[in-house]
Every structure is written in C-alpha cells, then in structure tokens.
Image (tube, rainbow, N blue to C red):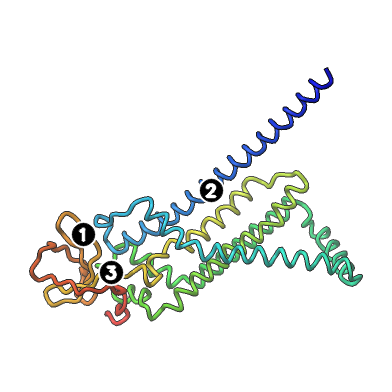
Amino acid sequence: MSDGGALLQELDAVLVKRRVASHYVVLALETLAAVALGITAVGAISSRFFNHTLGRTDFANESIRDWLSIGMSATIAPAVILIFTVLGVGLLAVATRLLLNTSATARGVKARLATFVRRCRLDDVSTLSACMLLLSATVLIAAWWYFVPFLGSLGTIAAGDISSVSGESLAFLSPVFHDYHQLYRKSFTAVVIVCLCLWYPAVWLSVRKGEPINRIILAGGAAVILLSVLLLDFPYRLIVGHKRDFQAVKWSGESCFMLGERQGHMLLFCPEAPPPRNRIVRADDPNLEKLGFVQDIFTNVHTLK
C-alpha cells in the first residue's frame, strides 16, 4: 500500500511539473504573439501615415508581413537601447548593494534617503504612482514642446499631402535636416525609456505591498507611454532616408519619382513641378523614361518655394 502511495505521489509530482512547464510555454507563446502584434501595429501606423502623406494610399500594395518588417525596423534600435539600459540599471543595483555592504557612509546615506521617502509619503503606492505619472507626463510634454515646429509641419502635410502643400512645409523633410530627424528619434526613444524606468519603482512597490495602483493613474501612465511610442514611430518611414527612396523617372522633361503602380497606371511625384506635384500617368506613356536608379524623393525639397 505504501509503495502504491509513493508511486501516486511521484506521478502527481510529474503531472504538476508538466502543468507548470505547459503554463510557461503558453505564457511565452502569448508574450511572443503580443509582441508581434504590437510591432505589426507600429508598422501599420507608420505605413498608413507614410502612404497618406505621399498620396499613394490607392497605389500601395503592402501586406501584414510588410507591416511586421517595417515595425521591426522601427523598434529594433529603441529595443536594443532599452536592453542596454536595463543591463546598466542591473549593474548599478549590484554595485549599490556591494557599496552598502562595505561602506558605513553609504548606509548612512541610504538611511537619510529612506527618511526623506517616508516624510514625502513616497512609500505609499498612491502617492508614488501619482508622482511618477506627473514626472513621465512632464518628460513627454517637454519633448513634444521642443519638436512642435516639426510636428506642426507633419500635421500640415498630413492634412493634405506632399502634392499640394507649400515647399516651406516640405522643407523639414529634406536630408538637410537629417541630424534633426535623428535627434527626434533619439529624443523620443529616451522619453519612452525614461517613462518606463520612472514607473518601475511604483510597480515594484505595488507588488511588494500587495496594493493595486489606482486604475485612473495606471491608465494615465499607460497613455503617456503609448503616446510616447506613437510619437517615436509614426513618422519613422517619413524621416528615415532609405525608407523614402523611390525609382527616379523622367516624364515630359520633368524629374519625378514613381511612388506606385496600379492597373497599368503609375503615380509620379514631381517635386519641382507646381502643385499638384503628384501625377497619374499610363505605364506605357511614351513621355515616361525610367532612369534606372532610386533616390530620396525629398533630396531637394528645401529649395522649393
């Protein structure tokens, strides 16, 4: 009887281990699916904005796989920076623990910091989460405010398209502003990472105390992070040089770019032509000549009037 009982216990232990393993496998698959869905959504948003701005929505033939590829391109650099940030924070935490174990001065500083935290009630989940919401929103607003001229220009272009807006509005898309475009990407990458880091103490304290964060505050924090990600990625295809390369063509003596093709017709963008700069021509138009190379369509838009 005892042998039978031991056998049942062993069998039960094996089944429990299998259930736990299955749980982790399902969790991993769900996480991968959520990440893939998020990356695809980023690619779709960036692509929809890009195609609308170029006036090529009816000529773009992009699949979910294309959106996934674009989303990966847009997020891989910020993701790598985030990973290195996490590693850096982890190393800093280890170094801090070692310092506390070996230095009385460091322990004194920690004690004074703990006193300050209690005095400001930052050991309270509601107070700390509210402070993190305020700080993360401030970081986002500061970055948004700095780039208002650029975002305003994007808004103006999006209200119409590159075919009809003024040359002044298109100027911000010129490669002349490459450094500015890179600064935009770097700034909002930093905003996303800073906001995530700011929320870590609040989430850690909530888990430690077993107290949930106020839903309204949590929703506000999620909104700030989501808006930061959207501001980082929605103009990705429009401001990253090689994503704006299209085939150069000559049409009726004008320098143009082929933005898309549909049912025997081509959509051309002729930047130096008077508005509307987009032209739809037949693919067999005798006045159309393909030049055999691709180029950034915004190369000379800073010279337009």
Where residue 153 appears, x then y in whole percent? 38, 70
Rendered image quadrant of residue 281 = bottom left
Residue on which disc 1 sits: 261
Neighbor class of circle 1 (other Cα within 10 Å; few <14, some 14-19, many 20+) is some
Residue 156 drawn above or below residue 213? below
CA separation, marks 1 and 2? 35 Å
Q: Quadrant location of the N terminus?
A: top right
Badge 2 crowding class, 10 Å Cα cut-off, few under 14, some 14 to 19, many 20 or more, is: few
Secondary structure found at label 2: helix
Residue 47 lies, with reference to residue 296, above or below; the image says above
- Which residue bears the numbered disc 2? 32
Report the amino acid beneath label 2.
Answer: Leu
* Relative side of 283 to 17, left or right: left
Q: Mark 3 points at which residue?
A: 246
Q: In which quarter of the image is residue 199?
A: bottom right
Dot 3 or dot 2: first in sequence order is: 2
In the rendering, at what x and y percent does residue 196 appear? Answer: 62, 59
Q: What element carries label 3?
A: strand
The residue depicted at 66 percent of the width and 35 percent of the height is 18
Separation of residues labelled 3 and 2 (CA atoms): 33 Å
Q: Which of marks 1 and 2 is in front?
A: 2
> First in sequence: mark 1 or mark 2?
2
